[in-house]
Image (cartoon, rainbow, N blue to C red):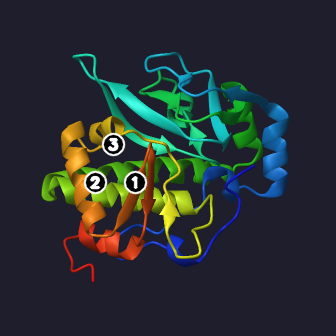
Amino acid sequence: MAGTSKRDGPARASAGAPAPRPGFWASLGSGQQTALRSVGRPRNYPVKAPLVYQGDESDHVIIIERGWAKVTSATEDGHDVVLAVRGPGDLLAESAVLAGRTRSATITALSPIRALVVPAARFTGFLDAHPEVWMLVTGTFVQRLDDSDRRLRAHVTSRGTQRLASLLADLAELSAQHAPPAADGSIDIGPPLSQEELGSWMDASRETVARALNGLRREGLIRTGWRRITVVDLPRLRAFAQDRDPA
């Protein structure tokens, strides 16, 4: 399964950012991975396919083996707001299963996905047989709350271009855990997010995102193409996001 290797170099967290942590799958021992595979079933999802729907009953968890997905929540006026992205090795929909409530968000494939689907009863049985994994599940949940709080603070205290820089720096660090940076240290952002999706995530218009991307390009911090963003210099991008001299 992808996401099991740990990489050094430009992927390391910059000052002011949380250190990247291995995903759920990479944190399991080989015996635990084998046991979890034995109670799950592989499944493929095409681009734009929903993995789970907001409001559905909770009857399984999903572990992404390959590919990227976005997490969205519908507002009262019918708009979808991007909350997060998930990638190789990530555990999905665990909070709804463990809490016995309906799904709080929709998860949709951004790219073709191969996943391991585990029925809720079998997943809780696996946790009972491997109680040390409970801490991994709890840690995943707490980390996601921390990430959400950190982005909310950035939204309140930063201007639009800084917010986008912070988001792209986070995505670059995430991407570098699954694919090596280029020889020059640049990092291709893995999740293929559109400008509209980036804007939804940072609560900004598509036009604001386009202007911010132009600004970051002029600073020499990123390169862009069709649904492709390359972070040229991650430490400088993080410094820019924190309103420090990026030189």
User: Which residue is at the front of the view, 135 or 29?
Assistant: 29
Question: Residue 49: image x %, image y %?
Answer: 56, 22
Residue where numbered disc 2 is placed: 213
147 sits left or right of 61 in the view: left
- Amino acid carrying mark 3 in the image: Leu
Q: Quadrant of residue 167?
A: bottom left
Task: Kindly identify the residue that appears in the image at 48 percent across and 46 percent down.
Answer: 141
Q: CA distance from mark 3 to mark 1?
A: 14 Å
**What residue sits right under mark 1 in the picture?**
224
- Whether the residues at callouts 1 and 2 have beta carbons within 8 Å, the answer is yes
Residue 104, quarter of the rendered image: top left
The residue sitting at 25% across, 70% down in the picture is 240
* Kind of residue at badge 1: Thr
9 w.r.t. 241: above or below: below
Q: Are marks 3 and 1 in contact (CB under 8 Å)?
A: no
Residue 37 location (% of width, % of height): 81, 39
Q: Amino acid at mark 2?
A: Leu
Q: Residues within 10 Å of mark 1 (few under 14, many from 20)?
A: some
Q: Residue at x 85, y 46 (%)?
A: 34
- Residue 27: name its quadrant: bottom right
Give whichever of discs 3 and 2 has the lower sequence position: 3
Tag 2 secondary structure: helix
Q: Distance between the Cα atoms at labels 1 and 2? A: 8 Å
Q: Nearer the viewer, mark 3 or mark 1?
A: 1
Q: Earlier in the sequence, mark 1 or mark 2?
A: 2
